[in-house]
Image: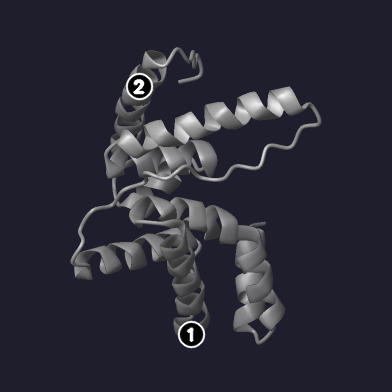
């Protein structure tokens, strides 16, 4: 069973601990996803807070047509797009390096992996928003194409095509710097 759904049902039944568990489980991933819509990390954190506030106050009905994570990310995406539409600065960059915690004991491997990830994030920033969000949701959030489609409001086939095109562009960018990514 979907732990997000269970925790949301607990929250709706009056147990505030359910909402706390949802925030713990999904907060970080949602923030990094929403980072693709904002100018900086603090704005992404605000969008994440707004998402959880909306969940807590409006208590939207979860119809179980998708995973709870898909439901939550859709709320966050809609809030980000609303903010974007109202914004005077209609640029959606992802130009800063994101912090990435690599858990390994070997400091050399840690350094190399952090450099690769920093460059990967830089290359992601060069992708169009549509490509960037699909790549993020599929590879970092590990959602399937159907779930991503529900979030970005596209068919599963359209998401698969977008992911393919995004991977091609990302691979070209990475290879320019000498990186080899066979998995792309």
- Quarter of the image for residue 26 reads bottom right
SS of the residue at dot 1? helix
Q: In this rendering, would 53 be left or right of 168?
A: right
Query: How many other residues sit within 10 Å of disc 2, few (<14), some (14-19) or many (≥20)?
Result: some
What residue is drawn where x is 53% and y is 44%? 141
Q: Nearer the viewer, residue 141 or 170?
A: 170
Q: Which mark is residue 173?
A: 2
Q: Which mark is residue 12?
A: none
On the question of residue 105 being in view, the answer is yes
Instruction: Return the disc, 1 or 2, that comes first in the chain's sequence.
Output: 1
Q: Is residue 58 above or below residue 20?
A: below
Pinpoint residue 7: horizontal percent, then vertical percent. Answer: 66, 70
Which residue position is annotated with label 1? 57
Q: In this rendering, would 163 be left or right of 3?
A: left
Q: Nearer the viewer, residue 120 or 58?
A: 120
Query: How many other residues sit within 10 Å of disc 1, few (<14), some (14-19) or many (≥20)?
Result: few
Image quadrant in which the C terminus is located: top left
Pinpoint residue 101: horizontal percent, then vertical percent. Answer: 66, 42
Q: Is residue 24 above or below residue 125?
A: below
What residue is drawn where x is 38% and y is 53%? 151
Q: What is the distance, in whole Å, between disc 1 and disc 2 at their CAs?
A: 43 Å
SS of the residue at dot 2? helix
What residue is drawn where x is 50% and y is 45%? 98
Q: Nearer the viewer, mark 1 or mark 2?
A: 2
What residue is drawn where x is 56% and y is 45%? 99
How does the figure colour the protein chain or chains? one colour
Pinpoint residue 116: horizontal percent, then vertical percent. Answer: 54, 26
Q: In this rendering, would 126 be left or right of 116?
A: left
Pinpoint residue 118: horizontal percent, then vertical percent. Answer: 51, 34
């Amino acid at each position: 069973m979907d732990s997000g759904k269970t925790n949301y049902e607990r929250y709706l039944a009056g147990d505030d601990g359910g909402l706390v568990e949802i925030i713990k489980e999904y907060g970080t991933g949602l923030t990094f996803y929403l980072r693709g819509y904002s100018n900086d990390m603090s704005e992404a954190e605000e969008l994440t807070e707004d998402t959880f506030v909306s969940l807590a106050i409006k208590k939207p009905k979860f119809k179980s047509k998708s995973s709870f994570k898909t439901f939550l990310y859709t709320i966050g995406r809609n809030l980000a797009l609303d903010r974007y539409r109202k914004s005077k600065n209609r640029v959606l960059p992802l130009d800063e390096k994101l912090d990435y915690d690599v858990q390994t004991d070997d400091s050399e491997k840690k350094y190399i992996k952090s450099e690769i990830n920093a460059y990967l994030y830089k290359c992601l920033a060069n992708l169009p928003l549509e490509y960037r969000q699909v790549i993020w949701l599929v590879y970092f959030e590990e959602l399937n194409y159907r779930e991503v489609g529900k979030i970005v409001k596209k068919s599963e086939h359209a998401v698969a095509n977008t992911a393919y095109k995004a991977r091609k562009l990302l691979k070209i960018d990475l290879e320019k710097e000498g990186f080899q990514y066979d998995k792309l």
